[in-house]
Amino acid sequence: MTGRNSYLAFGGAYHGDTIGSLSIGAGGFGTDIFDPLRFPVMRAPGFDTPNAIDVAIEMIVENCASLAAVVIEPLVQGAAGMEMLPAEEFAKLGIACRDNDVLLICDEVATGFGRTGTLFASEQCGLSPDLLVIGKGITGGYLAMAATVANERVYSAFLGDDLGPRTFYHGHSYSGNALAAAVALKHLELIYEWDVLANVNERSDQLRALLDAKIAERPEVKAIRLQGLMCGVELAAPREGLRWGRKVCASAVAQGVLLRPLGDVIVLMPMLTTTADEVERIVNVLDAAITEGTRT
């Protein structure tokens, strides 16, 4: 990888809050203060641009001599307001990375462990990343844990003599926490024992039907984006500054349903074991909250 010292990331991307993560992220959320510390990256359009993947592929081909890796949130950009692209759009990105000897890094901290309807969103996208970034759902949210999964190519690059030139020295104080690892292992067992993925897809279908019936045609709603149990309901505020998102979510919380806004996008992310009754309650409360929260 000599001479390859740059990354390609996407508009709207969010990958975390360390300096490196902020650099490949697209900014926002009060990150401007850190701009002097962020390193430059190549930036393809976000998922709100239909041809974002095609543009990224053109950038890979044109810049492969200096490009080390492409970093992507497969299928769903959560922090961007649940922006999504069709799963079939992504496989060609993986092919372009392989053809040009560029590493592919899939950030599945938000999408992993069943949230999109498969264990990993990469599966639906036809992507086989060189590095897979996982966290959050690995323990079902009960304990903090994250991991980076490497394929054979990357793993082998660090094999060699002990304390030799290939040794990977980087680590941190809380690596390998035994309690978190035990919780993660049990969580993985329960995903299969309880057939959680089947429930995610059934509840997603139910959620889509209810949103289509009760929410989609409301004049206050601009768009609904749903994949598995990741959903964004984008409101159509008539002008800036009305803070509809915060008002609608506050109304929902007052009615016993915890929703959060990303600007004027209402985020619906029920637990993966949610029931049919709970999904119906969520949509009914959202319907009432939109009425209350958008009064002008």
Image (cartoon, rainbow, N blue to C red):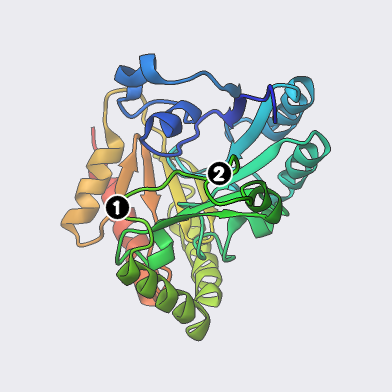
Amino acid at the residue labelled 1? Leu
Quarter the C terminus occupies: top left
Dot 2, how many residues are within 10 Å of its Cα: few (below 14), some (14-19), or many (20+)?
Answer: many
Residue 273 location in percent, x, y? 41, 74
First in sequence, mark 2 or 1: give its number.
Answer: 2
Q: Could you tell me how far apart the alpha carbons at marks 2 and 1 are, in whole angstroms?
A: 22 Å
Q: Is 28 rendered above or below residue 251? A: above
Residue 137 location in percent, x, y? 42, 62
Q: Is 11 rendered above or below residue 123? A: above
Tag on residue 73?
2
Where is residue 281, by image quadrant? Answer: bottom left
The reply to whether residue 244 is visible in this rendering is yes
Q: Disc 2 on helix, strand or loop?
A: loop
Dot 1, how many residues are within 10 Å of its Cα: few (below 14), some (14-19), or many (20+)?
Answer: many
Where is residue 240, by image quadrant? Answer: top left
| 236 or 274, nearer to the observer | 274
| 156 or 162, nearer to the observer | 162
Residue 291 location in percent, x, y? 28, 47
Residue 162 location in percent, x, y? 55, 51
Amino acid at the residue labelled 2? Glu
